């Protein structure tokens, strides 16, 4: 009887530790998200100031990327990091700068390009699970719109085709299936156990 009571107390103690750990992680993640949102907003203003305005031309002159889709996406440097443009997702009330390449420290600042190019219609963007970034991707409904504006001011309009959840090990699926879509965004969810993915087709 005493052994059973002892085991019960140990299990309760372990349960309390798990709850406390979960609350601490949630609080820390919330703080990081708020901080990332503020940094993104500050950088967004600086990126927007550097985006060239592309005016509609009656002579139908093609943009540089249309003539050379394989060209590198232009970047601007801010605080030692390169940015390729801005992503806008109205249904999530998001307007965010996008870094040209990714690392875990960079993801603490803004969403980043995982790979691909808007010019080749295979752009993949990633972020942490912050609500201020792509953390609420799973809330998007089919038909939701997104806009990517590159540093040269070219606008790329997209429409959501579907959302899905993938295991972190499903890299091949993420990349291979992205060939069928023009824009893919993803973020980790459930403490990094899964990835929520949004697939978009470009609106011509």
Image (spheres, rainbow, N blue to C red):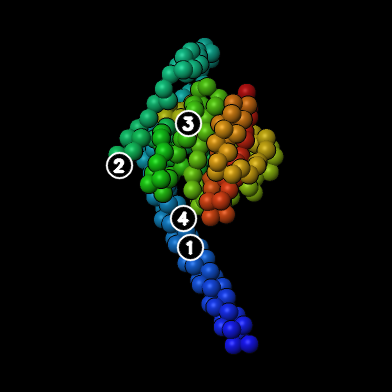
**Mark before the other along the chain sequence, 3 or 2:** 2
Count every numbered label the image shows and give the total.
4
Of tags 4 and 3, the one toward the viewer is: 3
Write down the residue under mark 3.
Answer: 115
On the image, the x and y values in percent for residue 15 come to: 56, 73
Q: CA distance from mark 4 to mark 3?
A: 23 Å
- Neighbour class for label 2 at 10 Å: few (<14), some, many (≥20)? few
Q: CA distance from mark 4 to mark 1?
A: 12 Å
Can residue 199 be seen from the camera position used here? Answer: yes
Q: CA distance from mark 4 to mark 2?
A: 20 Å
**Mark before the other along the chain sequence, 1 or 3:** 1
Asked which secondary structure carries label 1, the reply is helix
Rendered-image quadrant of the C terminus: top right
Q: Which mark is residue 33?
A: 4
Question: Can you say whether 147 is above or below 55 in the image?
Answer: below
Q: Residue at x 50, y 52 (%)?
A: 130
Q: CA distance from mark 1 to mark 3?
A: 29 Å
Of tags 3 and 2, the one toward the viewer is: 3
Write down the residue under mark 2.
Answer: 79
């Amino acid at each position: 009887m005493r052994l059973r009571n002892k085991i019960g107390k140990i299990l309760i103690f372990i349960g309390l530790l798990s709850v406390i750990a979960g609350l601490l992680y949630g609080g820390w993640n919330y703080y990081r998200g708020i901080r990332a949102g503020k940094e993104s907003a500050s950088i967004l203003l600086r990126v927007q100031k550097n985006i060239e305005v592309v005016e509609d031309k009656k002579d139908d002159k093609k943009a540089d990327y249309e003539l050379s889709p394989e060209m590198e996406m232009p970047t601007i440097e801010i605080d030692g990091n390169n940015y390729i443009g801005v992503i806008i997702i109205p249904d999530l009330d998001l307007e965010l700068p996008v870094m040209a390449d990714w690392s875990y420290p960079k993801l603490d600042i803004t969403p980043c390009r995982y790979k691909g190019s808007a010019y080749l219609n295979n752009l993949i963007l990633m972020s942490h699970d912050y609500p201020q970034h792509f953390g609420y991707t799973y809330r998007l409904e089919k038909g939701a719109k997104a806009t990517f504006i590159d540093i040269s001011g070219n606008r790329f309009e997209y429409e959501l085709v579907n959302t899905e959840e993938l295991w972190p090990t499903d890299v091949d699926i993420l990349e291979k299936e992205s060939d069928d879509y023009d824009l893919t965004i993803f973020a980790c969810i459930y403490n990094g156990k899964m990835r929520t993915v949004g697939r978009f087709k470009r609106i011509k």
